[in-house]
Amino acid sequence: MVIEGVPRVFIYVVLVAVTLLAALEVTAARGSVSAPKADTSSASPLRHMGQAIARGDVAFAVTARNEAYRAAIASRRWEGFLAAGDAILRLGDMTQNRSTAEPEARRLYLSALFRARGQQSLDGVLLATEVFARLGDGDVVEKGLRMARDLAGSDPEAQARVRMVADRSSRSAEAGSADVAPAHTVR
C-alpha cells in the first residue's frame, strides 16, 4: 500500500509544478507584450494636444494634456516626460497662464531628468538640463551637469557634449531667458 501512494504523490507534485511553470510563462508573455504598447501610445495624446492648441480648442487641449500625462507615466521613458512638459508649457502660453503651467512642467522635466539618468541616457540628461537652464533653475542645471559628467565617464566625445551644454546653459542663465523651446528640438 505504501508503494502505491508514492507514485500518486509524485504525480500530484509534478502536475502542480507544471501548472506553476505554465502560469509563470503566461505571466511573462503578457508582460513583454504590454510594455511596448505603453511606449507607442504616448505620441497620440501629444499629437492631439498639439492639434487642439493649433486650432485654439482649450477644452480639448486640457483633456489631451491629462491623457499625455498618463501616457508619459505609463511609458516609463524620459522622452515622454520631456514631451509632456513641453506640451504643458505650450498650453500655458496658449491660455496666457504660463505661471500656472510652469510648476507642472518642471515636475515633468524633473521626472525626465531622473528617468534619463536611471536609463543611462546622456541625451536625456543633457536635454532636460538645457530645459532647466532656459527656465533659469541653476541648481537643477548643476545637478544635471554632474549627472551628465558621470554618464559621460572618460569618453572624450561625450565629455565634449557635456561641456557644450554647460556653455549653452551658462549663456541661457546670463540672458535670463524665460522662453523654453521644446526639449526635443534641442541638440
Image: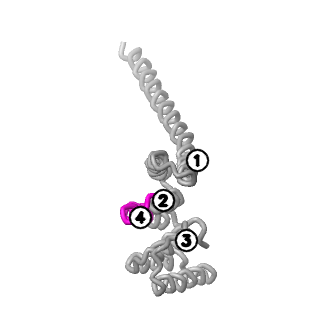
As rendered, which of 61 and 80 lies closer to the eye?
61
> Looking at the picture, how far across and down is residue 129, in whole percent?
48, 74
Mark-to-mark CA distance, 2 and 3: 31 Å
Q: Which residue was labeled with disc 3?
A: 122
Q: Which is more N-terminal, label 4 or label 1?
A: 1
Mark-to-mark CA distance, 3 and 1: 22 Å
* In magenta segment, residue 176: no
What are the residue bounds of the magenta stretch? Answer: 94-109
Q: Judge whether 144 appears above or below 22 on screen.
A: below
Q: Which residue was labeled with disc 4?
A: 98
Mark-to-mark CA distance, 4 and 2: 8 Å
Q: In the image, what residue type sits under mark 3? A: Leu
- Which residue is located at x 54 percent, y 79 percent? 153
Q: Which residue was labeled with disc 2?
A: 94
* Element carrying mark 2: helix
* In magenta segment, residue 98: yes
Q: Which is more N-terminal, label 1 or label 3?
A: 1
Residue 130 numbered tag: none
Dot 4: few (<14), some (14–19), or many (≥20) neighbours within 10 Å? Answer: some
Q: Can you tell which of label 1 and label 2 is closer to the viewer?
A: 2
Q: Which residue was labeled with disc 1?
A: 40
Dot 2: few (<14), some (14–19), or many (≥20) neighbours within 10 Å? Answer: some
